[in-house]
Image: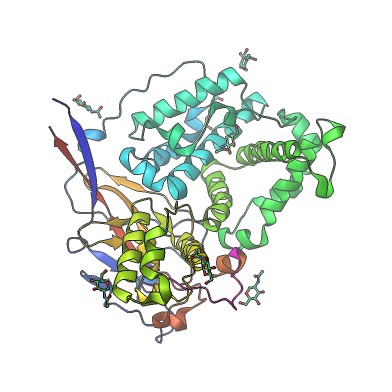
Amino acid sequence: MKERVFFKLTVNISLLQVFMLSLCVHESCSIDMNNLGGPLLVDKQADAFLPKISPIGAPQPFLPLLAPSPLAPFTNASVPKLSGLCTLNFTAAESLMSVTSIDCWSTFAPLLANVICCPQLEATLTILIGQTSKYTDVLALNGTLAKDCLSDVEQILVGQGASNTLRQICAIRSSNLTEASCPVKGVNEFLSTVDTPKVLAACEKIDPVKECCEQTCQNAISEAATKLASKGSDLLSLDGPNILPEHSTRIDDCKSIVMRWLASKFDPSHAKKVLRGLSNCNINKVCPLVFPNMRHVSKGCGNGISNKTACCDAMESYVSHLQKQSFITNLQALDCAAKLAMKLKRSNITQDVYSLCHISLRDFSLQVGNEEVGCLLPSLPSDATLDVTSGISFVCDLNDNIAAPWPSTSQVASSSCNKSINIPALPAAASVQSCLYSDNVMIFLLLALSMVLMMLL
Ligand SMILES: *[C@@H]1O[C@H](CO)[C@@H](O)[C@H](O)[C@H]1NC(C)=O
Ligand SMILES: *[C@@H]1O[C@H](CO)[C@@H](O)[C@H](O)[C@H]1NC(C)=O
Ligand SMILES: *[C@@H]1O[C@H](CO)[C@@H](O)[C@H](O)[C@H]1NC(C)=O
Ligand SMILES: *[C@@H]1O[C@H](CO)[C@@H](O)[C@H](O)[C@H]1NC(C)=O
Ligand SMILES: *[C@@H]1O[C@H](CO)[C@@H](O)[C@H](O)[C@H]1NC(C)=O
Ligand SMILES: *[C@@H]1O[C@H](CO)[C@@H](O)[C@H](O)[C@H]1NC(C)=O
Ligand SMILES: *[C@@H]1O[C@H](CO)[C@@H](O)[C@H](O)[C@H]1NC(C)=O
């Protein structure tokens, strides 16, 4: 007899206490509650206990949840089998690693990979190497050490509950812990090559909203990496439009070196904020969903949408495939909506099928529970949390009751820079018009997802 393990995500909204925190300063700011379902608690005094919306510091889920712990059998902190050869100082990043194992929690890891788990894992590796460089004076591991250390990191995380396929999920190889093609790895050579005060000034305090637009720290890192990269050989030090592919790879590899150095200059928790803030800029730019073939939609919605039912059925079925993939942020959902619209237009569907079929942004995210609630993650860096009695929880941003915008042909696609400026404000939505572009608006739906494991024989 074969044993198979199934898991399913469930959220029972009616069991959840959902706090909706409206921080609108203006009374005029109204929120459409009809779409939310479930008991709601609106607290206009919420400012008192919600962290200031200054986007440093991700919103923390602070709501303990009610379900019994289906996770209990999985919380054995097993003793990791370590190689004993890795020189990374794990004590320097202990709490960081436990956050990482929760962000990358077993069955959740693939669903949170793009936005939460992998960025956190990458930051952790960078910080581990950076912190260790304070004692070893090198900003990279050699090939053998890299193998041992990656395996040790994995063992430690798995021992704390993380998925045991993180390497595959996050596409991390041991070469990612080495200097790769960057010609500089020694701290002393680094210090003599790079204008370190400049990098430090640009990166010590990053505002994750402004950084994505102004790229202050990112530019400083690129500049430093370019300098490091050009140390290798004169042949490759060409600047300008003729940058060879090897050279750009080299610059990328040197960026890792710069980030490790940065991570050695801050304490691990601050380094994490900086690194997650930086990676977040790239995350929100790209829709991570894979779009399947559109044949059925083209058929259902073709001919100038002669049959609305057939068209919307086809759309719904198409979108339901997207929904199975992963949790995405609200900004990614905007990207996904734009990308899908482009594909639809390419198959001659020019009418706004989003409004025709009531497709909303949250339709692009993973749907959870019987109530089919789409959960969009916040566009600022966030982490999952674990409560042994309630399970894994993470913040869903309620900025998702919003119709998917159909790009008009006249409208130039808004740049990610412009979009970033509006984080964490709501994307355009009629019901909350007066809140648009206000940094004081933040609404969270705090969802704790409990995992139900069913053993089927
Ligand atoms: C947790 O520990 C129990 C008892 O020691 C064991 O039966 C179970 O298999 C362990 N679970 C995991 C996931 O290691
Ligand atoms: C590891 O890091 C801790 C905390 O930062 C520090 O106290 C300790 O000296 C380091 N250990 C080694 C061997 O470098
Ligand atoms: C890798 O680095 C470790 C520690 O610095 C050293 O002991 C080992 O000899 C190095 N291995 C190679 C192949 O260079
Ligand atoms: C790991 O290294 C590969 C090249 O070896 C690179 O393509 C990839 O982006 C790196 N991954 C991370 C997370 O840095
Ligand atoms: C429209 O499509 C639906 C579902 O495919 C079908 O049941 C219905 O008969 C169609 N209506 C017309 C007027 O063709
Ligand atoms: C779109 O319409 C044009 C002109 O009506 C036609 O030539 C083209 O084949 C159509 N493309 C698709 C993908 O249906
Ligand atoms: C940002 O948006 C404003 C108005 O919506 C527009 O004028 C400007 O060109 C945009 N900036 C970029 C960089 O796209």
Q: Within the image, what quadrant is residue 152 found in?
A: top left
Q: Is residue 379 above or below residue 147?
A: below
- The secondary structure that dominates the magenta segment is loop
Q: Seen in the image, is 357 located left or right of residue 211?
A: left
Q: Seen in the image, is 138 located left or right of residue 192?
A: left
**Closer to the camera, 235 or 47?**
235
Q: Seen in the image, is 15 located left or right of residue 412?
A: left
Q: Is residue 62 above or below residue 178?
A: below
- The location of residue 312, given as percent across then percent down, is 32, 70
Quadrant for ligand 1 reads: top left
Residue 397, can we see it? no
- Magenta part of the chain: 396-416
- The location of residue 417, given as percent across then percent down, is 61, 65
- The location of residue 392, given as percent across then percent down, is 30, 47
Instruction: Report the residue that reaches farthest toward the bottom.
Output: 28
* Residue at left offset 56%, top offset 65%: 420
Q: In this view, does 67 lie above or below 229?
A: below
**Closer to the camera, 189 or 215?**
215
Residue 37, can we see it? yes
- The location of residue 240, given as percent across then percent down, is 83, 49
In magenta segment, residue 290: no
Q: In which quarter of the image is the N terminus?
A: top left
**Closer to the camera, 200 or 218?**
218
